[in-house]
Image (cartoon, rainbow, N blue to C red):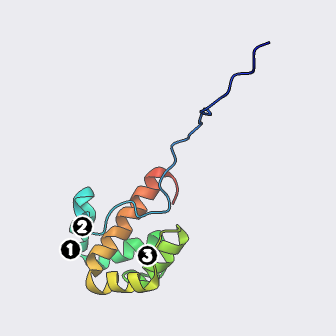
Amino acid sequence: MNPPPVVFVQPQFSVATARSNVWQTGLMDCCSDCGVCLCGVFCFCCLGCQVASDMNECCLCAGSVAMRTLYRTRYGIPGSICSDFCTTLWCGLCSLCQLKRDINRRKEMGIF
């Protein structure tokens, strides 16, 4: 009688999932969506209102630390209020553009 075969590697089943708990683009990744960055450069307030509208928030809060923190915690993106504050303070335009690019990407993936 032969002993049963020993299985060393189990077959794996994997499903491609969207990276939902990280920023979809980098802070300075303006080339990934030039339209968003150009809108931010030439009409920061318009871009801010678009982001606020997407998040069902007041237009006056768009470029704030609170908005970035709300978005980051909603999607489980690692970070802290301190990092949100520093990012918004020293690179407010990049921060707002990153938010808008992320919203657009999540809409495309159907997870916004």
Checking the image for residue 82, the label placed there is none
Kindly identify the amino acid type of the residue bearing the numbered disc 1.
Val
User: Could you tell me if the residues under marks 1 and 3 are in contact, i.e. CB atoms within 8 Å?
Assistant: no
Is 111 placed left or right of 98 in the picture? Answer: right
Q: Which mark is residue 41?
A: 1
Badge 2: how crowded within 10 Å, few (<14), some, or many (20+)? many
Residue position for label 2: 37
Tag 1: Cα neighbours inside 10 Å, few (<14), some, or many (≥20)?
some
- Quarter of the image that includes the N terminus: top right
Gap between marks 3 and 2, in whole Å?
Answer: 16 Å
Q: Hey, which residue is sitting farthest right in the picture?
A: 1
Residue denoted by label 3? 52
Residue 31 x %, y %: 22, 59
Q: Nearer the viewer, mark 3 or mark 2?
A: 2
Amino acid marked by disc 3: Ala
CB under 8 Å between discs 2 and 1: yes
Distance between the alpha carbons at the discs numbered 1 and 3: 17 Å
Asked if 102 appears above or below 4 in the picture, the reply is below
Residue 53 appears in which quarter of the rendering? bottom left
Q: Quick check: can you spot residue 56? A: no
**Residue 23 in picture, x, y percent from top left:** 41, 64
Whichever of callouts 1 and 3 sits on the residue coming sooner in the sequence is 1
Q: Is label 1 in a helix, a strand or a loop?
A: helix
Q: Residue at x 51, y 43 (%)?
A: 16
| Tag 3–tag 2 contact (CB < 8 Å) | no
Type of residue at label 2?
Cys
Q: Residue furthest top?
A: 1
**Residue at the image position 24 percent from the left and 69 percent from the top:** 39
Q: CA distance from mark 2 to mark 1?
A: 6 Å
